Image (cartoon, rainbow, N blue to C red):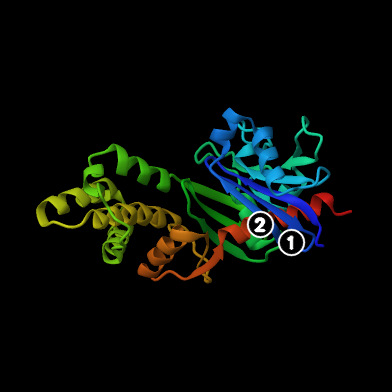
Amino acid sequence: MIEPAYVAVDWGTSSFRLWLVDRTGDVLAERRSGEGMLAAAKAGFPAVLRSHLAAVEAPDHLPVLVCGMAGARTGWVEAGYVDTPAPLSAVLKQAVRVPSEVRDVRILPGIAQRDAGAPDVMRGEETQLLGALGVDAAGEALVCMPGTHSKWVCVKNGIVERFATFMTGELFSAISRETILSLAVAGADDAEDVASFKAAVKAAYEAPAFAANLLFGARSRQLLFGGAPAAARETMSGTLIGIEVAAGLSGSVPQAGVKLIASGRLAMLYRLAFDTLSVAVQPVDADEAVRHGLSMAAAAIWTK
């Protein structure tokens, strides 16, 4: 019988993912739920974790390694930050143990950019970077990590030199629900309008200063020329992604292009956006990246 070696947890703002992992890094069991930091803060972080540990029958002695928002100031136990320029290897060394737990539970730190002109923070994405790049990756990488709060990260020889956060996903949610554009997308089905998305990406990339105007165009075009709610939704999505990509590509871009760490629909949308702009992409599955990063950290912490 294969024995588990540790439990890996990616604890986000609104999501919870847990994997029971053996010594080779293979997943023996998995749990996913909507019990992210916001929900766990109400229910209690220990109670949420213990319920999922019980569900996968994790032995009492098994250690747990956590990344993400459980280590935020408003999370379970604050895990602090590694400051830029931040060697990814430093993330492995600064895990914080949860003092109230009998079980060995540790939370990885985030990365902070303490620049008064461009202050920024990340939690969870540093573990994806670990998994995708390793600690000793030679050369320069420009990494795009789409999400509610997308990250663009410049990494050189295993050191995070700078990064920027874009509220793309959150803006899309707010705009599509709380503004006049909610009328444009009302009743939208799951149909994908690739042409509308690509046109919006290109227009926003070429004229990001007109973003607010381009967004309103999703409604005015529908009123004047017709069009399905799905087309308006793809126009809004493409516009927001287009202005994000315009900013992300505004500096130097490595010859290899952009390393895209993403999964599911976001991976598809960003690949389509980069293809529209003829930008080379190196895709990495986000789930695999975070699991690999947690595996590297677990080996550094518990392997003697």
Instruction: Name the residue rendered at 52%, 41% in the picture.
Output: 14
Tell me where residue 130 sits by quadrant: bottom right
The amino acid sitting under disc 2 is Arg
Q: How busy is the neighbourhood of tag 1: few (under 14 within 10 Å), some, or many (20 plus)?
A: some
The amino acid sitting under disc 1 is Gly
Q: Secondary structure at mark 2?
A: helix
Residue ID for mark 1:
25
Residue ID for mark 2:
291
Do the CB atoms of the residues marked 1 and 2 lie less than 8 Å apart? yes
Residue 130 shows in the view: no
Q: Is 109 on the left-hand or right-hand side of 192?
A: right
Quadrant into which the N terminus falls: bottom right
Residue 286 position, x and y percent, is 56, 58
Residue 105 position, x and y percent, is 76, 40
Q: Secondary structure at mark 1?
A: loop
Q: Is residue 278 above or below residue 218?
A: below
Question: Marks 1/2: CA distance?
Answer: 8 Å
- Number of residue marks: 2
Q: How busy is the neighbourhood of tag 2: few (under 14 within 10 Å), some, or many (20 plus)?
A: many
Front residue of 165/168: it is 168
